[in-house]
Image (cartoon, rainbow, N blue to C red):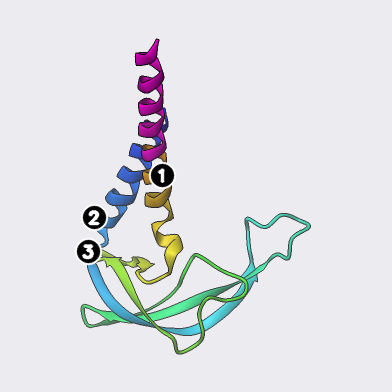
Amino acid sequence: MLLTAAGFILSQVYKRRETLKGHAAARVVELLLEKNPLAKTDDYQNCFYPVLEFYTGGKLYKIRYPEGSLPSRFTVGQKVRIDFDPENPADFVIADAGMHQYLPEIIAGAGILLFLLGILIFLRFAVRG
């Protein structure tokens, strides 16, 4: 079951990456302080959402990134790399957003390793007796 879950996670991650074949340099032009829709009522409810500006296909795009943070991971004027869907440049992710970008692969890999380790331990004790 764990292996199935890991496979599903990996397939979703790689399917998403297949559509984001465009690459561009973007700049943070604004930080919007907005209410986080996922915040619980007793939490501090605001997050900073970066607004990114980038050129592709001769057009300038200025789009609010949907992932907010508190404190802000970005500063106004900061340059970041983005991956985007060439058919819809508004569909993008920040390519150098940090380690959390690889979290699904790390969790899936750890799940697969633990599953295999469990099989090896089971086989070792099953062969004994």
Residue 126 image label = none
Expressed as whole percent of the image width and height from the top left, the position of residue 39 reads 67, 57
In the shown orientation, is residue 18 left or right of residue 66? left
Q: Residue at x 37, y 26 (%)?
A: 119
User: In the rendered structure, does residue 14 fall within the stretch colored magenta?
Assistant: no
Q: Which residues are magenta?
A: 113-129
Expressed as whole percent of the image width and height from the top left, the position of residue 90 reads 35, 68
Residue at which label 1 appears = 110
Residue at which label 2 appears = 18
For label 1, count other residues whose C-alpha is less than 10 Å away and answer few (under 14), some (14-19) or many (20+): few
Q: Residue at x 45, y 89 (%)?
A: 77
Q: Secondary structure at mark 2?
A: helix
Q: Secondary structure at mark 3?
A: loop
* In the image, residue 62 above or below residue 124: below
Q: Residue at x 70, y 64 (%)?
A: 45
Of the 4 image quadrants, the one containing the C terminus is top left
Residue kind at label 2, given as amino acid type: Glu
Residue at which label 3 appears = 21
Distance (Cα) linking label 3 and label 1: 27 Å
Q: Residue at x 53, y 75 (%)?
A: 73
> What secondary structure is the magenta-colored segment mainly?
helix
Residue kind at label 1, given as amino acid type: Ala
* In the image, residue 30 above or below residue 15: below
Q: Nearer the viewer, residue 98 or 95?
A: 98
